Image (cartoon, rainbow, N blue to C red):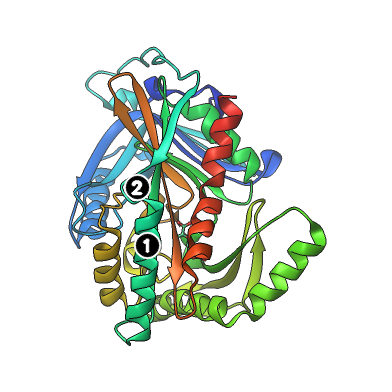
């Protein structure tokens, strides 16, 4: 264990080329923080997960022994036909911080020339505008109506429709402060920043640790009001709602089916996962892998689960692409890390925003979706997407008051 102390999350800026992964509250938080890029690999199409894994394995095989345990951050696109690319970044310096202490892996000496950290870019001081993204509220509502019609007609059982919204800033997104604010407000979620995508997701797609595998499927949601009695009643309603339990069952089944093919797994009872602003029906799946599968490979097999796509998968993919009409990019794709022995953790990139450049500042393009089944009410689904954008909206309000 090295004594070199890790950087303070809140101090990180774009000049560091940071990568961030954090789960848990302060004292017990597990973090991986990266600075700089030793390697950047990209892939696209259906085979993007396998391609990235192959390239990363080849890269690791050529590294010296002192780098053992090296991690790569991955953010993959939702769709295989996205215009965006899926990316794998091996940070130049990486700190792995957990209960056992801090381990730092510095790959700088292996680079032809180690780049200096550049100056912080002009930080935003305020939000200058907020507006709908590619899909207006009206278009989202009519998409939900059409999805329900097709579900009732028997074309599919479930789909997930998303929309986007833009927050315009007068300078650069304060990456470190925003990530720190998300991590503080959502300690049970996984806070991430990878290649311009920032968020705090509650949905752990897969964790692989020395042959053990775990996943948490979420679907079926209700807002959290902060009033204990009202939230208790809302949780009970969620557990008994035919619409939410069926919406959840599709998501859980999609995960269980895939994991059963490659692992011996146990499935928990469905329970309510409460977050500060929203609650979800949750099912945990855990067990032991049969054979060798890296976290990245398992993420690729689980993706796209019915939590963010639908059932049957192909029909849902087609319907959501048609009704949303925009490219989700890396929203709702797997984001996480994998190490040189295949261990790793991936969440679904939810409750997030993509950082986009503008001539006079940067934008945060937020995304949120909602599962649509028989009985879905368009206005409630729209309201749910607003609730799901609260983490980013509140974190930005906190760092740019
Ligand atoms: C698609 C999203 O959430 C998914 C995860 C949890 C609950 C969901 C729901 O109740 O609709 C969604 O399936 C999102 O946050 O953008």
Nearest the eye: 216 or 111: 216
* Residue positioned 55% across, 56% down in the render: 202
Position of residue 18 relative to residue 188, above or below, is above
Quarter of the C terminus within the rendering: top right
Residue 317 percent location from the top left of the image: 28, 69
Nearest the eye: 343 or 81: 81
Specify whether tag 1 is near ligand 1 (CB below 8 Å): no
Position of residue 15 relative to residue 333, above or below, is above
Nearest the eye: 40 or 355: 355
Residue 330 percent location from the top left of the image: 32, 49
Look at the image and tell me whether residue 272 can be seen. Answer: yes
* Residue positioned 20% across, 62% down in the render: 46
Find disc 2 in the rendering and name its residue.
74
Mark 2 crowd level (few <14, some 14–19, many ≥20, 10 Å Cα): many
Mark 1 vs mark 2: which is more N-terminal?
2
- Furthest-bottom residue in this view: 154
Q: Is residue 132 left or right of residue 235?
A: left
Secondary structure at numbered mark 2: strand
Q: Is residue 51 left or right of residue 100?
A: left
Q: Is residue 110 left or right of residue 261?
A: left
Nearest the eye: 205 or 100: 205
Residue 299 numbered mark, or none? 1
Position of residue 232 relative to residue 359, above or below, is below
* Residue positioned 29% across, 25% down in the render: 358
Residue 335 percent location from the top left of the image: 39, 50
Look at the image and tell me whether residue 1 can be seen. Answer: no
Secondary structure at numbered mark 1: helix
**Alpha carbon separation for disc pair 1 and 2:** 11 Å
Residue 100 percent location from the top left of the image: 62, 43
């Amino acid at each position: 264990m090295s004594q070199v102390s890790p950087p303070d999350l809140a101090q990180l800026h774009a000049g560091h080329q940071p990568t961030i992964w954090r789960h848990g509250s302060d004292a017990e938080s597990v973090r991986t923080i990266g600075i700089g890029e030793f390697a950047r690999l990209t892939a696209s199409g259906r085979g993007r997960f396998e391609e990235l894994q192959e390239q990363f394995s080849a890269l690791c095989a050529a590294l010296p022994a002192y780098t053992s345990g090296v991690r790569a951050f991955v953010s993959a696109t939702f769709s295989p036909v996205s215009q965006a690319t899926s990316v794998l970044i091996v940070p130049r310096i990486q700190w792995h911080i957990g209960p056992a202490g801090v381990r730092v892996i510095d790959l700088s000496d292996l680079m032809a020339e180690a780049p200096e950290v550049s100056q912080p870019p002009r930080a935003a001081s305020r939000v200058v505008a907020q507006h709908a993204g590619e899909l207006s509220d009206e278009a989202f509502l009519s998409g939900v109506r059409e999805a329900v019609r097709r579900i009732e007609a028997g074309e599919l059982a479930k789909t997930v429709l998303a929309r986007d919204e833009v927050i315009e800033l007068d300078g650069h997104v304060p990456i470190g402060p925003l990530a720190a604010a998300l991590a503080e407000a959502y300690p049970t979620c996984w806070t991430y920043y990878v290649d311009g995508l920032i968020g705090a997701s509650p949905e752990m797609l897969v964790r692989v640790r020395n042959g053990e595998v775990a996943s948490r499927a979420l679907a079926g949601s209700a807002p959290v009001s902060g009033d204990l009695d009202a939230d208790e009643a809302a949780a009970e309603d969620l557990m008994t709602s035919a619409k939410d339990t069926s919406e959840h069952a599709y998501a859980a089944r999609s995960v269980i089916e895939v994991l059963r093919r490659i692992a011996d797994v146990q499935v928990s009872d469905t329970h309510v996962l409460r977050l500060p602003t929203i609650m979800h029906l949750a099912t945990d799946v855990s067990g032991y892998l049969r054979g060798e599968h890296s976290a990245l490979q398992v993420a690729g097999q689980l993706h796209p689960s019915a939590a963010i796509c639908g059932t049957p998968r192909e029909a849902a993919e087609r319907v959501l692409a048609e009704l949303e009409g925009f490219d989700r990019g890396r929203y709702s794709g797997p984001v996480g890390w994998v190490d040189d022995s295949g261990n790793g953790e991936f969440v679904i990139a939810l409750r997030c925003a993509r950082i986009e450049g503008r001539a006079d500042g940067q934008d945060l393009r937020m995304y949120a979706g909602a599962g649509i089944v028989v009985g879905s009410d368009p206005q409630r689904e729209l309201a749910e997407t607003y609730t799901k954008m609260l983490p980013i909206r509140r974190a930005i309000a906190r760092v740019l008051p």
